[in-house]
Amino acid sequence: MTNIGFIGLGNMGGPMAANLVKAGHNVIGFDLSEAALTAFKNIGGTKASSAIEAVENADIVVTMLPAAKHVEAVYCGENGLIQASKKGTLFLDSSTIDVETSRKVAKVAAKAGRLMMDTPVSGGVAAATAGTLTFMCGGSDDAFKKGKEVLDVVGGNIIHAGASGAGQAAKICNNMMLGIQMISVCEAFAMADALGLDRQKLFEISSAASGQCWSLTTYCPVPGPIPTTPANNDYEPGFAAAMMLKDLRLAADAAKAVGVNNVIGQKAKELYEAMNDAGMDGKDFSGYFEFMTKKQN
């Protein structure tokens, strides 16, 4: 049994923490939402009164926070997690943030005698609940070795991408591909509808042809072909459009910083900005199909 502090018990963090509790770990959690804390307590977790209390006696701390400013403030601010924790504590930050901030916080942790990895995830709420998330890990070999046993409980694929920041780099690149691919699949189904091609037939053909991709075969954006996708539940989010836009903005900023020409990534960002501006930011990102077809009609 490992003493684990868990900060951020929302749509992703809540199921992750629950799986750690089920595996027999002593998990002390904190969230600003009282409802999230109550739900966590109801599944056997220990509710902390503050983030500081959650980490004081922890061997490993997992954070799942909204943005870089929150990560930096929670870790490095006055009375931050790094100073409140024991020496030798391992921090696993599963937030999706920019590479520069991730590396900056890791340096502060190292200077204070703590280990840290950036461990952003892929898979959405369904994978968080099932314990099959993909973790993209950036940090030292020692940090990866210490953290993998815990990450194996909540993930199906635990990949050491490289040094600090490499996990965030992998997440940003991956989600830029995902956003682009989802738009292409949505546009293909809209074109199929206009041409009179049955959606199920397009799904069957492209799933076995060169158009095959995760956005088609696992997360199909139209109702019917895969009954369990958000498209069959009024696009209730497994991964909200607002979160996809956040990641595409991170990708755009990263590309600009390193001088990479990501024209299609930029266009995908603009299209999701339009979807969010239309009030669909709370819909699943696959709801781009609904957005584009309503806009055309």
Image (cartoon, helix red, strand yellow):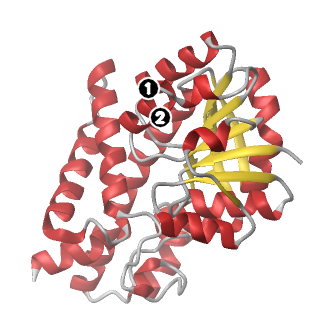
Give me the disc on residue 253: none
User: What residue is shown with label 2?
Assistant: 74
Q: Would residue 42 be found to the left or right of residue 50 on screen?
A: right
Residue 86, x across and y down, in percent:
72, 25
Quadrant of the image occupied by residue 56: top right
Q: Is residue 81 visible?
A: yes
Label 2: element kind: helix
Q: Amino acid at mark 2?
A: Val
* Residues marked 1 and 2 touching at CB (< 8 Å): yes
Residue 172, x across and y down, in percent:
44, 39
Quadrant of the image occupied by residue 46: bottom right
Within 10 Å of the Cα at label 2, are there few (<14), some (14-19), or many (20+) other Cα atoms? some
Q: Amino acid at mark 1?
A: Gly
Q: Outermost residue, front direction?
A: 49
- Nearest to the observer: residue 267 or residue 98: 98
Label 1: element kind: loop
Give me the disc on residue 77: 1
Q: Would residue 89 be found to the left or right of residue 266 on screen?
A: right
- Nearest to the observer: residue 130 or residue 161: 130
